[in-house]
Amino acid sequence: MSQIQEVKDANNIVEIIGERIDLKASGSSFRARCPFHNEKTPSFFVHPEMQRYRCFGCGESGDVLNFLQNYDGMTFYEALKYLADRAAITLKDFNRTSEDEEREQLLAILNLSKEYYHFLLTEHRAGQVALKYLKDRAVNNQSIKLFNLGYSLASWDGLINYLHKKKKYPLDLIVKTGLIIKGNDGRYYDRFRGRLMFPLKNHRGQVVGFSGRLLDQQAKEAKYINSPETSLYHKSKLLFGYSELFREIRKSNKVLVVEGEFDVISSAQAHLNYVVAIKGSALTSDQIDLLSRAAQTIILAFDQDDAGIEASKRAITLIKDKDVDLRVIDFPSLKKLAKTDNLKDPDDFARFEPKLWREAANQSISVYSFLLNVIFANHDAQTPDGKRKIINELAPIIASIDHLVEKEFYLQKISEKLNVKLSLIKEDIERVAQKKSSAEKPAKKDAPKSDQVKEHQQVLEEYLLFLLFKLDSETFEQEVKKVLSLNYQTPGISNILESLASKLNNFNLEKFSKSLADDLKEILMECLLNPVFIKNTENVDLKKEWQKILVQVKQNIVHSEIEKINLELQALDNKNERSAKEEQRVNDLLEEIVKKQKQLKA
């Protein structure tokens, strides 16, 4: 047995996938909404015996290693090592690629840097200025530890001395992390100097970059700087606090999205632990994917300026086809309830009005209500021009609502606010929405079609194979031998049955599937996990169903063979003259048809 197979055998695919998505038992398999494409009806299946998964919507399939690579973004080696570590298996003589080796080194450098910055903040006298700054902002020791906050020396080479001179990492390799810069003069400099350091982690908790907050108010530098885009750090894919607070987010089934690191830290200290911060000015599709993995309700706490409004509109398009409830913190109402007018952002509310901040999250409003209120506030609803502008802005928003009752609710609100008949509002909004839709033609993210529509005979043959594996062991062995000689139209089924016939003694499905070539393994898995087949055999006598489908398959095969014979006969009949050999062939074909017709009557 190879070490790769040993590692796979030591891990249960149901357990691995179940830690990441919500699996529900479905017969002998497990079912879920597919994590690889947008869908509302679950079509993703995991088969415990075969230790494989398949989505019948988008066609994604594979084993536990494939899943970790596709879902967690791991390389093959990372997935293998992750599973080996879980099973306490030491990988021996495994040849890593140069890319794997470099990635591992870069992650090690970034992790060392996190520890170095954290040490400077918490144990070195140089970090006292940053520690005082944090205390002034009411950041406690628990948060400093949870988020691994740190401090970078004000010198040009503090980190270089540690990583290069002490830890012996090559300068050119450190440059690839984005932590140091190579100047035009060929010298190297620390990117982050005299800053409070926030480690930026991917969803697996690996440090991939940093954000640094300037502490010297007199310095003529940007208040915040982030790591540049690297092979590991991609701003659009990260959420500050996601890995640290993931358990709380999943437990509460909701997540509050804010704009800054201190917003996250202060909210967590205010016992609002389901919070993350975006990196950048607006939510991205990658970030929405991460959020929807963990929670069903996403609450936006953006500034309610033009940028915040546009971010909310964009979020609506990103959650399209996802089973997500998008909501917004009602800041105008929140500010009216606050004891002071000086509270501006989530950090302020969490620090000075923690109870009010928690209530605001619990009483968040629908994103549609929020945008409706904002758009009405920006225009005069009493004038024809104002009414037209309101309709133009609201049309694509209202048109995006899938649920008819919810859509009707907002249409009625618009009708009341504009004092215009509901029928006219509906007509106008539909017209404007269609006009904008045809002009923009946005690309819709949906499940790619994995197969063309299958012919009836292929479906029957796959169903027959499915039923075969559902029979009791004694009947199973008898029937395998009966169906071996059939002339199947579906590619791979004959090969599967031939392989099966040689492994009937002490048959074990898991071992059998491992013995198959990858293409045959996929065919078998697609048959065994087919949701239509599973549904069709609920409360059904499997032996009777097997016999019924077997008869249909045999008859269809014979009909297909007769059709082929008729085509050959037709070609021979079309000839003006036939040779003696061709005449004999015609007679043989006619006899063959008679035999086939007798088979149909038998």
Image: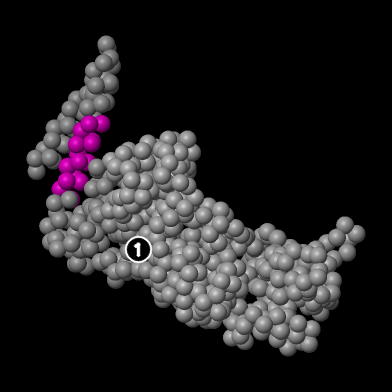
Give me the residue at 71% from left, 75% from top.
196
Image position, residue 12 (x, y; %): 41, 73
Instruction: Give the residue at the far right of this rendering.
Output: 185
Location of mark 1 (residue)? 32
Q: Main secondary structure of the magenta part?
A: helix
**Over which residues does the magenta segment extend?**
550-564
Instruction: Give the residue at the far front of this rendering.
Output: 382
Image position, residue 210 (x, y; %): 68, 69
- Quarter of the image for residue 144 reads bottom right
Q: Identify whether 394 is placed above or below 85.
A: above
Residue 134 makes an appearance in the image: yes
Give me the residue at 66% from left, 73% from top.
198
Closer to the camera in the image, 10 or 328 = 328
Residue 293 makes an appearance in the image: no
Q: Is residue 118 left or right of residue 449?
A: right
Instruction: Give the residue at the far top of this rendering.
Output: 576
Q: Residues within 10 Å of mark 1 (few under 14, many from 20)?
A: many
Q: Amino acid at mark 1?
A: Ala
Q: How is the image coloured?
A: one colour
Q: Is residue 525 left or right of residue 80?
A: left
Give me the residue at 71% from left, 71% from top.
213
Image position, residue 226 (x, y; %): 69, 64
